[in-house]
Image (tube, coloured by chain):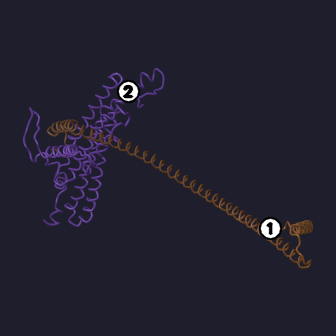
Chain colours: A purple, B brown
Amino acid sequence: MSAVAFAQMTQEELRHEILHTWEVARESWVIPLSLGPMDISINKIIWFLWLGTAITFLIMFIGSRLLKERPGAYQVIVEELYGFGRNHLGAQMGEEGRKWFPYTLTLFIFVLVINVIGLFPNSYPVSSNLSFTIPLALFTFVIVQQQGIARNGIGGYLKNWVPGGLPEGILSKLALGPFLFVIEAISRLITQPATLAFRLYANMLAGTLIIYVFLSLILYFGVATALVSVPAAVVFYGFKLFVAVLQAYIFAILSQVYIELAMFGEEAH
Amino acid sequence: MGTVFDFPNTSLIFWQLISFAVLLYLLYRYVYPPIRDRILQRQQQIEQAIDEAERTRAEAQELLSEYRRQIEEARGEGRRILDESRKQGEAQLERAKAEAREESDRIIQRSREEIERERDSALQEIRQEVADMVIQASEQVLGRTVDRDEHDRLISQALDDLDSELASGAGAPGSGR
C-alpha cells in the first residue's frame, strides 16, 4: 500500500474506517444467546462490559480484603476512594442523603473503569453506547422516584414539584401552578435521566471519535498528514483521559444530587 | 444499524442491567461494610492515640513543674544554708576577736598588777636597806650602839613622813604610772 492508494479511498470507505469500532463490535467474539424473542447474545460489547464490571469489583474487593492495621499504598487508595464517596459525593443537600453515597461511589468507579478501558486500542468504549448509559441512568431514575415517594409520600413528593413562592391569587393557583408542575414533571421524569445518559454517551463517543477522525486523515490525505494528526490525536487522547474522569464524576455527583433533590425537595426550595 | 447510535441494543441493555445490579449487590454485601468498619476503627484508634498523647503530655508537664519546684526549693535551701554559714562565720569571727581583746586586756591587767607588786616589794626592800644604813651610819657617828627599837621607830616615822610627803607631792603623776 502506498500514499497514493490511501488517497484513492472514498469518503464512504473512510467513514467505515472511523466507525469501525462500533460497526464490528456486535459481530465480534459472539456467543449467540436469546431469551424468548429477545436477543441477548454475548458479543465484544458485553465482554468489555463484564471486564469493566469485574475490574471495578476486584479493585474494591481486593482493597477490602487486604485491610491491615498499617495501610499500604493500595489500601490507602481504596480507603481514599471510599472517603471521597463519603465526604464529597454524599450529603449534597442533607445529612440523610449520605446513605446513598455507596451507590454513587459505585457509579463513579464503574463508569471511570469503563471509560478508561475504552481508551485502550482495540477495546470497545462501552460508555459510548446509549444502550449502556440509558439503563445506567434508569437505575438512578428508579432510586430518585422511590426515595422521593418513600420520604415525602406520593402526595408530598408531587407537591414538591410545584416550586414554592408562587404569587397569590386564583390565576396563579389555576394556571401558573399546573404549568410549573408540568415543566417540573418533564424535567424530573424525562430531562434528568435523559441528560444523564446522553451526556456520558456523547462525551465518550466524541472523545473517541475525534481521535479516530484525526488518525483517519492520514488515510485520506496521505502519510505526510501524520505530522499533524498524530500529535493532535495524542493531545486529544490525554484530553479524553481527563474527560473520562470528569464524566464519571459528573455522572455520580448528578445522580446523588437528583436523589437528594427528590428526598429534600421541600427544604431545598 | 448498530453504529454509534446503538439503541436499543437488547443484549447490552439486558446484560448491563444485570451486571450493574450484581456489581451493586456484591459491593454492598462484601466490600463496603469491611472498609467502613476499618475506617471507623482507625478513627477510634486515632482518637485514642490523641487522647493518650494528650494525657502523657499533661503528665510530663506536671512532672516538669514538679521538678522545677524542687530545683527552686533546693536553690532556696542552698542560699539559706550559705547565708547561715556566712552569718555563723561572722559571729565566730566577732567572738574570737572579742575573746582576743579580753585576753589581751587580762594579760595587760595582770602585768600591771605584777609591776605594782614588784614596785611595792622593791620599795619595801629599799626602805629596809635605808633604815639599816641609817642605823649603821648613826652608830658610827655617835660611836655607840643605838637602841635598836627606838631607832627603828624613829626611822619608820621619818620614812612614813617622807612617804606621805611623796604621796601628796607627786599624787597626780603617781596615778599615771
Measuring from the top left, give residue A170's x and y in whole percent. Answer: 46, 20
Give amino acid for label 1: Asp
Residue located beneath label 2 in the image: A160
Locate residue B42 relative to residue B21 in the image: left or right. right
- Residue at x-position 23% and y-position 64%: A226
Locate residue A32 relative to residue A233 in the image: left or right. left
Task: Determine which quarter of the picture holds residue B8.
Answer: top left
Chain of the residue on which disc 2 is drawn: A
How many marks on residues? 2
Locate residue A235 relative to residue B149 in the image: left or right. left
Task: Determine which quarter of the picture holds residue A26.
Answer: top left
Please identify the quadrant where the N terminus of chain B is shown. top left
The answer to which of B79 and A42 lies nearer the viewer is B79
The answer to which of A165 and A145 lies nearer the viewer is A145
Residue located beneath label 1 in the image: B120
- The answer, for residue B172, to whether it is visible in the render is no
Q: Nearer the viewer, mark 1 or mark 2?
A: 1
What is the spatial separation of the Cα atoms under label 1 and label 2, in whole angstroms?
A: 144 Å
Locate residue A211 relative to residue B141 in the image: left or right. left
Measuring from the top left, give residue B74's x and y in whole percent. Answer: 52, 52
